[in-house]
Amino acid sequence: MGQHISDDEDTEQAARKKYADIRPLYERLAKEVRHVLEAKLSDAGIDPVSIIHRSKEVGSFADKIARKRYTDPLSQMTDLAGVRVVCAYESELATVAQVIESNFEVRERMDKSVDLGVDRMGYNGKAFVTALGAQYAGGRYENITNLNCEIQVRTILQDAWAIIDHQLIYKNEDSTPERLRRDLNNVASLLEIAQGIFDSVREKRATYISEIQQKQNDPLAFLAQPLDFDTVVAYTKWKFPDREPSEKLTQTLLRDINLEDYPTLRQLDAIVERASAAVEAYRNENPDWFKSGTDFLTKSLGFVDSDFRAKHGFSPRTRTAFVKFNDLVHS
């Protein structure tokens, strides 16, 4: 006697087969949504930590049918295609949301933190159920413009919580032991506090950079500032406006310089002035090694400061130049 298959099982198997057949469409949709987001976020000045895309695996699709008891899973599931945008700061999430609203047909908006309330576990970002819409019709968008794609928008710490949520929390929160639920709520609270601190530090740094820039019209006040990453970058732009500073090389400079000998930018500026003729002679001989404004700073320090010269990873050619053009260094 054959094994009896229930109507529910028969429906699930049919839905699973149908989804397996059309899954390539959702994979293509997720890639296109990611492509649009990458371009539009760049235009908006947002540099996300990551943007990833995926189409739901067939096994995951089947598991969700069983768990949620969908009657029409292909229309009821809105996350068959998904894109996740992860940002460093919560203040960036509003801009990401604006980009989504402007470039997609938004069919549903979800704020997971609001849904949780005050006494539930979790620390989540926002999500949007979107479609490409008519503006993307034709060609590469054929057959995918009307399909749903869920776009999740999170900070790094919200994403960290989601990983913890996936690893440690029971699918049904009410089945989680109370002692674990309490500890996990504490983790969520700490992550939220940490995010607030990170955002606050970012705002303070932006204010600090603005204050540095405002002093550029007063050279005495500008050069009286202490050496740190932001002041050295600002000084490089001020001294060599036609050359962008190198962030990586600035970090290396600050690692190798003796800050006790350079309490302010004034001491650094004096070195640059003393070495200017020698640096210019070397640049004329070897222009390819002066791509950034920071290259001028490190070469200036190399010509004048023996301690910096010993610590910094100068090439043999540059070390030869220090000797060759030493007579051009002002005393």
Image: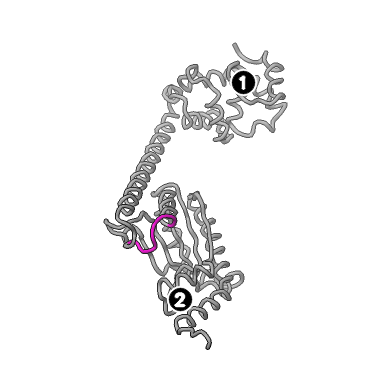
The residue positioned 60% from the left and 21% from the top of the image is: 311
The C terminus, quarter of image: top right
Quarter of the rendering containing residue 244: top right
Find residue 210 and name its label: none
The residue positioned 42% from the left and 79% from the top of the image is: 71
- Circle 2 sits on which residue? 73
User: 189 or 140, which lies in front?
Assistant: 189
The residue under label 2 is which amino acid type? Pro
User: 13 or 118, which lies in front?
Assistant: 13
- Circle 1 sits on which residue? 302
Q: Secondary structure at mark 1?
A: helix
Q: Secondary structure at mark 2?
A: helix
* Image position, residue 2 (x, y; %): 53, 87
* Image position, residue 224 (x, y; %): 43, 22
The residue under label 1 is which amino acid type? Gly
The residue at the far top in this view is 331
Q: Is residue 90 above or below residue 304?
A: below
The residue at the far front in this view is 1
Quarter of the rendering containing residue 253: top right
- Which color mode does the image show? one colour
User: 238 or 197, which lies in front?
Assistant: 197
* Image position, residue 110 (x, y; %): 37, 63
Q: Is residue 328 above or below residue 144?
A: above
Look at the image and say whether residue 308 sits in the magenta stretch. no
Instruction: Give neighbour class at mark 1: few <14, some 14-19, many 20+ (Cα, 10 Å).
Output: many
The residue positioned 47% from the left and 32% from the top of the image is: 230
**Left or right of 118 in this view: 145:** right
* Image position, residue 321 (x, y; %): 70, 21
Q: Which residues are magenta?
A: 166-173
**Mark 2 or mark 1, which has the lower sequence index?**
2
